Image (cartoon, helix red, strand yellow):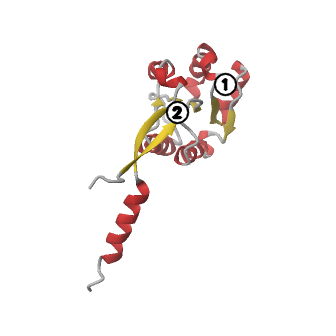
Amino acid sequence: MFENEYFDATIPEQKCIALIAHDNKKKELIEWCLKNKKVLEHHFLCGTGTSAKMVADHTGLPVRGYNSGPLGGDQQIGSRIVDGKVDIVIFFSDPLSAQPHDPDVKALLRIAQVYDIPIANNRSTADFLITSPYMDKEYTRKLLNFRKKVEERAKTIGTEGADA
């Protein structure tokens, strides 16, 4: 029954870490990156527009920048999660300010959950992640076999109404 329902997916020793912050949290993200620079410099870094540029400018760390969040950057990061190219998300979100692209943020958080990606939404959680023994070694997680689920669903949908 559970055969092939899940498969092993490995987060490599050298990770791709997405760095994102809402405007009111960018300074905090930069401070966090400076504090953890020695760990971060051993990993690949990316981020949405302004966050990526500001972290790179203030820390000297190489950060690949995507579009700004409101211009699709959150979806770009989400797409990279789906493709297995982002392993951790550090997203200092501002829970006290309305965000014009809130649906995009929720979609990013959802896709990180679906793909069982570690995600930190605040400094404390980011501190726990960055100091984890898994930061410098491989980690294997179990992912739902989405292909199998799609195949099963296609078979079910394909037979509905066939008798009518």
Q: How many numbered tags mark residues here?
A: 2
Tell me the CA gap for discs 2 and 1.
Answer: 15 Å
- Outermost residue to the front: 3
Percent x, y for residue 132?
47, 20
| Quarter of the picture holding the N terminus | bottom left
In the displayed structure, 5 sits above or below 60; it is below
**Mark 2 closeness class: few <14, some 14–19, many ≥20 residues within 10 Å:** many
In the displayed structure, 126 sits above or below 77; it is above
Helix or strand or loop: what does disc 2 sit on?
Answer: strand
Three-letter amino acid code of the residue under disc 1: Val
Q: Which residue is mark 1?
A: 55
- Outermost residue to the top: 35
Three-letter amino acid code of the residue under disc 2: Val
Residue 155: quadrant of the picture: bottom left
Give the residue at x 40% y 65%.
151
Q: Which mark is residue 89?
A: 2
For the residue pair 66 and 129, the one nearer the viewer reads as 129
Q: Earlier in the sequence, mark 2 or mark 1?
A: 1
In the displayed structure, 78 sits above or below 148; it is above
**Mark 1 closeness class: few <14, some 14–19, many ≥20 residues within 10 Å:** many
Percent x, y for residue 39?
60, 19
Give the residue at x 64% y 31%.
44
Of circles 2 and 1, which is in front?
Answer: 2
Helix or strand or loop: what does disc 1 sit on?
Answer: helix
Percent x, y for residue 31?
60, 16
Q: Do labels 2 and 1 touch, CB within 8 Å?
A: no
Give the residue at x 45% y 27%.
96
| Quarter of the picture holding the C terminus | bottom left
- From the viewer's perspective, tell me whether residue 56 is left or right of residue 117: right
For the residue pair 6 and 57, the one nearer the viewer reads as 6
Percent x, y for residue 86?
56, 39
